[in-house]
Image (cartoon, helix red, strand yellow):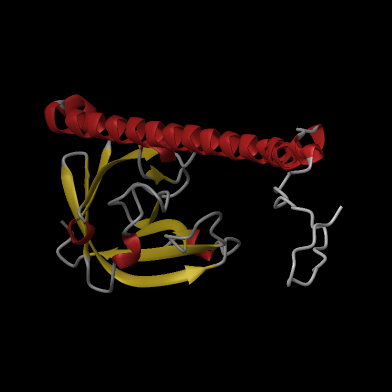
Amino acid sequence: MPVSLPGVKCMQVLRTTVTRPRRFTQDRTRLILKAGSWRPCEIHIRSKLLASPRQIVAYVLIIAGATLCTGVLGTYSWMYLKQRALLKQWNTEFATRQNLTKLSIPRIELEDVVLEGVGARSLMLGPGHLQGSVEPGAVGNAVIAGHRDTFFRRIHSLRYGDHIYVLRDGRQFHYIVRVRKIVAPTDLSVLRPSQDTELTLITCYPTHAIGPAGRRLIVVAKLAASGI
């Protein structure tokens, strides 16, 4: 019941309500960990699992390449050791020297024992003398072949006038380069007999090509006028 005071007008005070500031409340559902929230991680893991076959293939290729390189290195090492052994026999055993031919080309620092035949094993151990051609030093065309990536890898550097020496049966034959040419593998004219005393060196060309080489490098040298 309102109280009235003398001389004071009555004033009606409206009822007010006090409201507290509303606190921020987080939706409880947002705090619940659901399985779906981990899907990005699952996708990341799956992507790694999908990449693993490619990684396996890469590892296999790396291992295969390393194995191949090791095999090639081992083969080349064995090849050069065998050739050094032949040179040692040449220098120390006179009887062995009588049955072998030694090829020496100062310009390219080549000094190797020539084996008989141009089969795979002969060419692996050194330059090979083509059976059916005359012996080096004899009248005719003596043909010697070698692999471009081993013993004959530098004969592409030979030019007109370079010197080649062949030691055989206790004699040294001095040849001088007269022809250098590139021919097709089917060109057998380079093997033809000659009325002169010639030495023909054959290897694949290009000498530094990766993979099969489709042509042949031919170096023809003739016996010097002195003969020996």
Q: Quarter of the image holding residue 11?
A: bottom right
Q: Residue at x 47, y 35 (%)?
A: 66
Across and down, in percent, residue 55 comes to 62, 38
Q: Nearer the viewer, residue 222 or 21?
A: 21
* Quadrant hosting residue 29: top right
Residue 25 image position (x, y, % from top left): 73, 44
Residue 98 appears in view? no
Rendered location of residue 209, percent (x, y): 48, 60
Q: Quadrant of the C terminus?
A: bottom left
Q: Position of residue 194 (x, y in %)?
A: 42, 63
Figure quadrant of residue 69: top left
- For the image shown, how many numbered marks are present on the structure? 0
Toward the right, the furthest residue is: 1
Residue visible at 19% across and 62% down in the picture: 107
Image point (45%, 46%), residue name: 130
Drawn side of residue 207 relative to residue 164, left or right:
right
Q: State the residue lying farthest toward the front.
A: 6
